[in-house]
Image (cartoon, coloured by chain):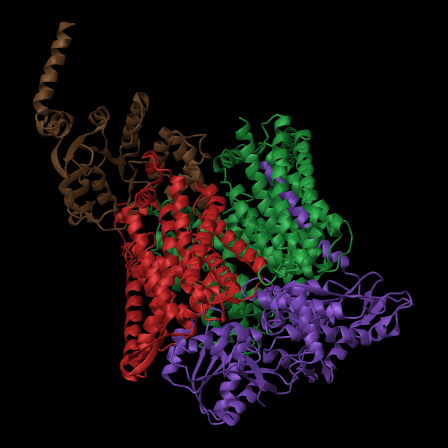
Chain colours: A green, B brown, C red, D purple
Amino acid sequence: MNKKLVSPSLKRGLTFGIVMIIFVLIDLDVMVATMLSKLFGANVIRGSIPDVGFMVLFLILFGMFVGWSTSSDDAKPTTKLFQALVAGLTLGVVLGLFDLILNQLIVTGTDVRKYLAALAPESIRLFLFDQGAISPLLHLGLFTVASLLGSLMKILLKSESASRFFKGVKSGYQGLQAKAQANTPNWVKKYGKFLLFLLIGLLAFFPPRIWGSYNNYVVGLVGLYVILGIGLNIIVGLSGQLMLGFAAFFAMGAYSVALLNAPLPHGIMLGFWPSLLIGILMAVVAAVLLGLPVMGMRGDYLAIVTLGFGEIIRILLKSDLLTSFTGGPRGIQDIRGPTLFGQSFSSDIDYTYIILVVMVLSIFIYKRLERSRTGRAWLAVKEDTKVAQATGVNIMTNKLLALCLGAAFAGLAGGIFAARNQFTGPNDHQLMVSMNILSILIVGGVNSIPGIILGAFTLKGLPEILREIENYRLLVFGGLLVVMMISRPEGLWPATRPNIEKDEGNKLKENGAPGEGGLND
Amino acid sequence: MTDPIIQVKNVSKIFGGLTAVNQVDIEVPEKHIYSIIGPNGAGKTTLFNCISGFYFPEKGEVLFYGDPIQGLSTNLVAWLGISRTYQNIRLFNNLTAVENILIGLHRNLKTNWFEAIIHTKRFQKEESGSVKEALRLLDYVGLKGYGDFLAKNLPYGLQRRLEIGRALANQPKLLLLDEPTAGMNMNETAEATHFIKRLRDELGITIILIEHDMKVVMGISDRISVLDYGTKIAEGNAAEIQANPRVIEAYLGPGGAALSEKYKKQRLSNAKSN
Amino acid sequence: MENEIRPPRRYKRSKLPKLVRWIFGLIVLSSFFWRLYTVIIVQNEYTPDIWVRLLISGLVIGGVYSLIAIGYTLVYGILRMINFAHGEVMMIGTFAGYFVFEATNAIRFTSSTGEITSLSNAQPFLSILLAFIVGMTVAATSGFLLEKIAYRPLRKAPRLIPLISAIGASIFLQNLAQLLFSPLVRDYKNPDLIARGQGWAITVAGARLTIPYTGVLTFSLSIILMFALYTMVRKSKLGKSMRAVAADKSTAALMGIDVNGVISQTFIISGMLAGAAGVMWGLHNGLVYYYVGFLPGIKAFTSAVLGGIGNIPGAMLGGMLLGMIESIGPTALGISYQLKDVLAFVILIIILIFRPSGILGEVLSEEKV
Amino acid sequence: MKNFKGLIVVIVAVLLLSACGPAAVDTPAPAEVVDANIPTVCSADRYGCAKIEPGQTIKIGMGSPMTGGDASFGIDAEQAGKIAVADAEPLHGFSFELVAEDDQGAAEGGAAVANKFVADQTLVGVAGHLFSGATAAAMPIYEAKGIPMLSPSATNPTLTQKGSAVFNRVPFTDAAQGKAAATFIYEELGFRKIAVMHDGEDYGKGLAEIVKVEFEALGGEVVEFVGITSKEADYTPVLTTIAAKSPELIYFGGYTQDAGVLANQMKTTGLENAVFFGCDGTFGTDFLNRAGANGEGSYHATPRTPPQTPEKTAFDEAYKAAYGVGPGELSPFTWNSYDCTTALIEKVGDVAVLGADGALYIPRGALVDAVRGLNNWTGISGTYTCAPVGDCNIQGPQFHIVKNGAFVPVN
């Protein structure tokens, strides 16, 4: 019994100890302390060391988290406390030993940064609270107490209250929905969607003028990736072809606009809109060229082939072979922006509008495709290719169609992207771009528009917001992806199938019954 | 007797060394229920696959209304009006029942993706029409109210019905049912049997049936043929087949015929005694 | 009614895909051979020793690719997932080896002859052995942890999920390494015995050429390891159970095989191979940094698919082939070395078009995938 | 399900709000405000003034890749810049701050960082960006706001051909170095048959192209012009192929890591007797460590400056002490980055005016002109005079040969 209690807690303490050690080794502890001090309004100059107090605070919070997570939900309070105690002690001991080493480094003045770059003496001192030899004891005590505190907190605000809160949210949400459904006059039902669009339009109109260029940039970026996400979703989510080289189509669009609309290397000033159209066409052409030969391939083979395709395009764009044509590694600069009714329409605000409009348009198109014969055919192909074919669906054409439409979206986004940055080069179309877009789908939720928007925000918006944490952001990002997949594999906002039968029923009897979640979600 | 809707002329299908179907001839008149029986691995399903275009038979030909259709890809076969169900149910699991049927309707719809984007009148008409049709079929196969369930969440019996519904959506002239009552209990089987009859009587669809449950087979089929090791060993109506010793051999193994005779006598005598 | 059912012309089975495929293939192959002909026969500006040199470097790099590719194939065979973070496991191995050599270099003492020498030079074989052992162990551990943390919870999930998780893990490990060891591009301190740029001089067709010691070491070692692995999978109990799990997890479990255990062991083995490959990479090329695993990872994945993913001999063959293509291909076809990856991928695509499941084919049946 | 969605909505809302955060910093450009405290220079200035409130710091931006394959460049530049800021004297009690952002060396990141910088009123100059792609995307954004750039490493010639007022840079133009190198090889060393290689990246390739053109113009023969994939680490095949053409010398445009590998692998690929000729990207103790004995007799370039001034030594020591790794090991642009930051700080000092309200006013237009007006300014990496287009290093390079593990000037 007791052993069954102790060993997991021990393990936890050990794990968190190692985590903390890694934190120290990559200097993340100092970073977090800095963030905390920023939270409390102290203005810390970049690269300078925050006050010791904040490090203490961070360690306490860490310890409390350990205690919280260690004390199991279904245990008696005393047991919880016991578990927390064990974990806290272990953590303390582990770090204590680690402290001894660190302290030794300080005392002897050895510089380990040739190997462990982040382990600067001042940050070590900060971690040890400048207490030298006795800091191990300090840490031991601190972690034990903090961990106990954590489990105490857990005991106090039990999970019930939390669940009650959620229930409240849920019932409130549904209640509102029901009420809304119940007392909406007919004209609203008729034009409701239209009005909603209008409202969104109005909302979208004002912020870009107010909130400064940086936010415009971030919003625009997210918007572009939403478009890309929709494009890839048609390929991966609807027609079920795993594509890892989506950036190739993106590049097609970007480079078409760049080459046709920049002074160098060719100086064909075709204008933005026509070249954007050509960009879309080019992407589609590329899709056909890729699609025809590899249509027959299955899951992972298709994946690697498309991956290869993406790399081929990138390398070619960069190579000496095409330098005279594509500008090689230097890329293409001074890409002219769009004009509207004669005058320039390419300020950051204008771009935000363009992107938002295009985004809404793509969502619209996507919705209509998904709810059409074609969309159903795609889903069927994804579910069971053979059976779909035996039910009269032409696999070849439908797959190819999906590929082309997806590519078209990519081309569109690419064109806008290039013009917006006034520059495009090989580095804009690396493998990681394709991976990011795929991640957007999975993180957000395949086949769900809100999911894709959410995913785009999480993957492109968040890193921008996370700029504060400098070069830790990709670390955090990578970690998040894994955690995400483990905790919510179906995505942040999973898709649900339409409730055709019920809706039809509602249509028949003209009074709209409260339409809360379908039988299938 | 009406001209045959489908003719299978000495079709053979060979996998590597093994001959799964060996020079089988079948001829099914319109509006008939035709059963194919035989022990497991006799090549019944393989024959189905040859008809529905999954396999390309090495020898022989499959005539549908007199036109050769062997080697046509499955979607064309479906397009011609031959639909089928599968031994191990193969629905589009993550789609709702209605959507499954809507996909079945695919072949009858004409609009393309572009019309879908710019909701043309034609598209809207077709969409709403197809939805109504789908719901009607749903009702017909007795899944009313289950339309918005994901196919995988449906109970087993309903999945079978849904699969038939999907097949019907194709407006088939010929329907291939692969063990439609497998894994059903007595009353379910009875229902299914009755349902299959209705299909033929009301919709006038010709049906080829693979079935192990002899009660069903003998109950509804106009004609039966027996496959064993890929070859057709007997053909005829229920009575003939029951009488045919080779069939009994095939099922009960050598000497089976004699045995079955003995049991029949016993049963009769028992009947007399009480 | 009757006429409607006659298949109209356009509904005849479309020969288009096959046609396109064959035309495509024909064009590519013919131009390919024409190119070979012009470069080798007509222009003929390369003496035989050049080809031998290219062959050697192809073999060396191919050996490394094979080792990593086996890792991909093993994991794929069992979990049907692309372990995108495998390259990072190799990177970790490379770093481990690097630190061993740094350590052995730091230990200095005066040898019997009197001059000051470092352990790595006094005991080269020992230090090399040590480096490989440490590298393999560390890499194996990281592979094991990777599976336990990032993949095991996703056993039941649809197939895209583990892929994304793998991508996340890959990004995470890269950046962790960068933050730990700084983005500095470090170089291996080889023992003088196998210093880079040194080698045996042999004469081919009257031309003197050098076979680098590191190359020889890398190649022979990779062959040995591959052989060992192959026999292990064929003969040993673990190998058998691995194949069983690959064939069908649930049945294997029913047969009393500890599936999770086997999977962990698979990751450990593939990690070991990757670690070895990493140390070789370091010894032969000398560059160590957090990004070092990425390219070889992609290449190895390519070669795994090239040979038929899930198929161990396939991975070996694919790796070697890819190495050859990369080293000899551009010269033989007379194109710039910048485009060697393009060449590699193009050849991959062509091969897949005509042999949709790799050269040696896939050992697992399609239904399972 | 539902409550989760509700939660998500809330989260998104919060994130959006936090995204809007920086907008609050956006105060209207002082030029528009009529205020007695504001010095006249501001109202006169075409871009207006940056106003630094007491307690705030004067921010110098730096955009560089800190993640991804080229992170070493960014980290190195940031570290050098930090030292520069630390060395700088506070100006009227206002201390300087270096804000280094990760632009991943690509256009996307470049534009993002630039937009973030221009949103910050207290940011007056940018020591960067490092890579030409990011620079090109960022330039127009700074142009609009009047923020001067001084790039330590963006060598793409076209950057200074666009008539930008704000963009300046301290590295060689490829033209200057390429011509000098070609002439040196042809006349001083007397080679007639060379091969030119580059790492396929912006900088190396541009340089290599010039060398090829110039060398052929002089009448020499370039037997092979080939790019490699940077940091790929196995170049034996390509070297072998080059060996077949038996060049007397191999010119390489790129960085130390690749240069070291090439120097090593040349010895096993039949190029034992060919001379390795690098550029200022391949100069540095780092090359010596990597190539060791194989690096003997190779040539490299630096700006024409005494190799070790006391300032430089001081900086080197400070850098080593602060980061545990020697300058020039992470990237060859350590000293340039230091100089760029220092120069900007110095120029800020020249133009800044202390307002009557105790706030510091920095006329942006004046600062732009001041940076462009950089004249005979000596830093630790060389002496700089900005040409009207913004190229601040038009002098030819100094070549060094490696003798017994040390660089020896040769011209």
Q: Which image quarter holds the C terminus of chain D? A: bottom right
Is residue A391 visible in the rendered image? The answer is: no
Residue at coordinates 35% horizontally, 76% vertically from top-left?
C210
> In the visual, does C201 lie left or right of A67?
left
> In the visual, does A84 lie left or right of D290?
right
- A339 up-or-down from B210: above or below: below
Q: Which image quarter holds the N terminus of chain D? A: top right
Q: Quadrant of residue C84?
A: bottom left
Residue at coordinates 32% horizontally, 58% vertically from top-left?
C224
Residue C86: percent from left, percent from top: 44, 55
Residue A140 or residue A406, whichever sits in front: A140
Q: Residue furthest top?
A: B274
Is residue D146 visible in the rendered image? The answer is: yes
Residue C75: percent from left, percent from top: 39, 49
Residue at coordinates 73% horizontally, 62% vertically from top-left?
D119
Residue A490 or residue D332, whichever sits in front: D332
Residue B109: percent from left, percent from top: 39, 47
> In the visual, does A419 lie left or right of C41?
right
- C123 up-or-down from D279: above or below: above
Residue A438 or residue B270, whichever sits in front: A438
Residue A7: percent from left, percent from top: 54, 34
How many numbered marks, from 0 up?
0
> In the visual, does C337 lie left or right of D375?
left
